[in-house]
Image (spheres, rainbow, N blue to C red):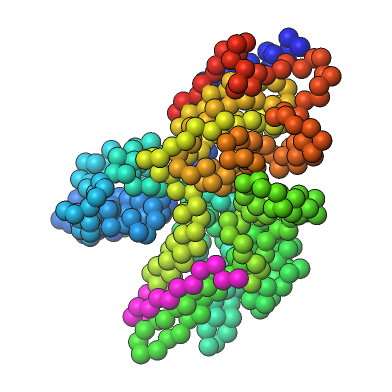
């Protein structure tokens, strides 16, 4: 028993001491990769400085719009063109205004690729990294809700269709090249392109991808260890000196929930429990009830012929933004509203408790966590949550956890397996923890209502 207390105590200590480091889990969304920069000036040094500044302004524009919903973009400046926020002068909330010095303070670093310069010109790709806490404070001070929660990464199959044919793995598929030039795994709905090697080509063809061949897509999902494949179907027409591109993101494959999960979902839906569906979130990478074959996003773009890479980049960004919108709306962080939740954590091992701890510490939807009591099989906590608790449900799903309540007041959190175990145990008895009553070796927690012998509180703030 003494050894158990030492282990549990050390876990609390880790939670308290290393909370800030855990925030690095979700910091990928604050990276804007491979921005194309170019400038011309009286000297190579001046051209380089101008290009990097212009790229930084473009990157901040992209980042702020990545994190916020379109309805709030009127409160954001368009730095790339030097235009102030559209709502400036009559907004009922803060309007963001940034100087070049402010931009430098937001940046934590950058990486340069394919740098080319001459006596008066400069061109490169630059990946900009921004300070998460500073960006959060910028939006929080402006009272603009934002999201930084990511879904699991999906594999994207870029299929290009023209009147001359359909292309996927061919060397002359510029649509595939566009997805590879700039990575899209920093989005709220991250996507990665396949390698495009001989094994990929032998697994699925362009025609099979468009036909959503289940066996071929399942084999590809297994190779890349993903739970979702999105077919990015681009249809290109060239007419009247224009390139016209229609892009559709199609849900081509999603991992199916197991029989036990489906049965458990039915039990939850038939009760009065407030809980997000198990067939959404981490098990499937789905944040909406998308069926195979469903169009997740669709957009149309056109421009004068002659620069397909630029058209492709605009089209990809537009389609991803539409695809991310419902997820973004479900995970927005609104610091103007918060709630205190009484939460019991259920776990079957110290590893599962570490997973719960890490998820709680890493999400910005949580202001602080108080661990009030701890045992081998459960913990009692008080959690400050920003915004609607339903958003915290979604955030925990993205971390592979189930968060639920049966009465709207008392909340529970566990891995899906432990959650199912807990519900089965509670069918025959009440109680917050799954520990057996005859386990004399258990280090028993006190409930929130048992104040007389309450153990010392451990609080994590970040």
Residue drawn at 65 percent across, 67 percent down: 291
| Residue 31 as seen in the image, left or right of residue 61 | right
The residue closer to the viewer here, 130 or 295, is 295
Q: Which residues are magenta?
A: 294-307
Residue 289 location, quadrant = bottom right
Q: Position of residue 142 (x, y in %)?
A: 29, 44
Task: Determine if residue 31 is in view.
Answer: no
Q: Position of residue 393 (x, y in %)?
A: 57, 44
Residue drawn at 43 percent across, 76 percent down: 300
**Magenta stretch holds residue 338:** no
| Residue 413 as seen in the image, left or right of residue 439 | left
Residue drawn at 40 percent across, 44 percent down: 334
User: Is the stretch drawn in magenta largely helix, strand or loop?
Assistant: strand
Above or below for 98 versus 254: above
Quarter the N terminus occupies: top right
Task: Determine if residue 4 is in view.
Answer: yes
**Magenta stretch holds residue 303:** yes
Quarter the C terminus occupies: top left
Please state the total of marks drawn on the protein image. 0
Residue 230 location, quadrant = bottom right
The residue closer to the viewer here, 345 or 58, is 345
Q: Position of residue 396 (x, y in %)?
A: 58, 42
Residue drawn at 19 percent across, 50 percent down: 46
């Amino acid at each position: 028993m003494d050894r158990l207390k030492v282990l549990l105590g050390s876990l609390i200590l880790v939670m308290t001491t290393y909370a800030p480091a855990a925030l690095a889990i979700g910091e990928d969304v604050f990276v804007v990769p491979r921005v194309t920069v170019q400038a011309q000036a009286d000297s190579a040094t001046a051209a380089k400085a101008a290009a990097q500044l212009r790229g930084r302004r473009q990157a901040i524009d992209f980042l702020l719009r990545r994190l916020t919903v379109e309805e709030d973009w009127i409160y954001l400046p368009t730095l790339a063109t030097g235009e102030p926020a559209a709502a400036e002068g009559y907004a009922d909330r803060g309007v963001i205004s940034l100087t070049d010095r402010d931009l430098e303070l937001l940046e934590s670093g950058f990486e340069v690729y394919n740098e080319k310069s001459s006596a008066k010109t400069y061109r490169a790709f630059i990946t900009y990294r921004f300070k998460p806490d500073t960006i959060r404070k910028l939006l929080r001070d402006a009272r603009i809700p934002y999201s930084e929660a990511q879904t699991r990464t999906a594999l994207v199959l870029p299929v290009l269709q023209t009147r001359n044919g359909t292309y996927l793995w061919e060397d002359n598929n510029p649509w595939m090249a566009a997805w590879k030039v700039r990575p899209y795994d920093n989005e709220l709905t991250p996507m990665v392109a396949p390698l495009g090697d001989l094994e990929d080509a032998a697994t699925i063809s362009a025609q099979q991808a468009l036909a959503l061949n289940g066996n071929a897509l399942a084999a590809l999902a297994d190779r890349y260890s993903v739970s979702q494949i999105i077919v990015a179907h681009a249809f290109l027409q060239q007419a009247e000196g224009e390139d016209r591109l229609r892009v559709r993101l199609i849900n081509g494959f999603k991992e199916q929930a197991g029989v036990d999960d489906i049965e458990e979902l039915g039990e939850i839906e038939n009760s009065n429990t407030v809980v997000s569906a198990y067939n959404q979130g981490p098990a499937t990478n789905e944040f909406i009830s998308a069926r195979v074959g469903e169009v997740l996003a669709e957009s149309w773009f056109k421009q004068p012929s002659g620069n397909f890479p630029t058209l492709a980049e605009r089209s990809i960004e537009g389609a991803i933004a539409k695809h991310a919108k419902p997820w973004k709306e479900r995970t927005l962080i609104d610091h103007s509203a918060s709630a205190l939740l009484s939460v019991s954590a259920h776990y079957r091992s110290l590893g599962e408790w570490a997973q719960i701890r890490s998820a709680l510490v890493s999400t910005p939807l949580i202001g602080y966590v108080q661990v009030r009591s701890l045992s081998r099989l459960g913990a009692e906590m008080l959690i400050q949550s920003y915004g609607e608790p339903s958003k915290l449900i979604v955030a925990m799903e993205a971390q592979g956890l189930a968060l639920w309540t049966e009465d709207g007041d008392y909340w529970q959190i566990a891995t899906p397996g432990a959650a199912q175990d807990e519900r089965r145990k509670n069918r025959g008895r009440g109680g917050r923890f799954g520990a057996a009553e005859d386990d004399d070796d258990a280090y028993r927690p006190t409930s929130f209502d048992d104040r007389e012998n309450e153990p010392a509180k451990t609080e994590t703030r970040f």
